[in-house]
Image (spheres, grey):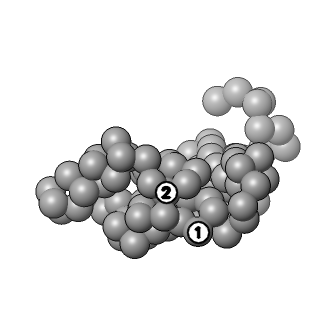
Amino acid sequence: MAISGSGNSPNILNAVDWANAHGLVTWGVTGYDGGKLLKLAAKSLHVPLFDMGMVESVHLVVFHWILNDLFGRVNHVGRYDDGQHTIKTAVFEGN
């Protein structure tokens, strides 16, 4: 996962280029017009806004959403129910 607000950070582009060359699936997380990263990464989360604060805020919300869902799946919290586990009522209940 490569994060670059402008999509043009040279070190990020080099890392994605290397990862692509070695057969890894690459994700580009960008703002503005996506820059070079939008085309270079295999998959992307692009926020087409020209306000870095807003771009970073949207990225943050999406990352929190993904991690919260992952936490729920791993710990069987919230909406995730596989029929074998009781749904817990609090995220930080333990276990």
Residue in the image at 77% along x and 30% along y: 93
The amino acid type found where label 1 is placed reads Asp
**Are the two marked residues, 1 and 2, in contact with CB atoms closer than 8 angstroms?**
yes
For residue 8, above or below residue 38: above
The type of residue carrying mark 2 is: Gly
- Dot 2: element: loop
Residue furthest out toward the top: 94
Where residue 37 appears, as percent x and y from the top left, is: 42, 62
Label 1 environment density (alpha carbons within 10 Å; few <14, some 14–19, many ≥20): some
Residue with the mark numbered 1: 33
Alpha-carbon neighbours of circle 2 within 10 Å: few (<14), some, or many (≥20)?
A: many
Question: In this rendering, is residue 91 above or below 77?
Answer: above
**The C terminus, quarter of image:** top right
Query: Residue 75's spot in the image, x, y percent?
Result: 62, 42
Cα separation, mark 1 vs mark 2, equals 8 Å
Q: Mark 2 or mark 1, which is nearer the start of the sequence?
A: 2
Residue in front for this viewpoint, 74 or 58: 58
Residue sticking out furthest to the right: 89
Q: Is residue 46 left or right of residue 62?
A: left
Q: Which residue is mark 2?
A: 7
Rendering coords of residue 27 (x, y %): 43, 60
Q: Residue at x 48, y 64 (%)?
A: 35
Query: In the depicted view, which residue is nearer to us: 33 or 65?
Result: 33
* Left or right for 5, reference 10: right
Give the residue drawn at x 76%, y 55%: 51
Identify the residue shown where x is 51% and y is 49%.
4
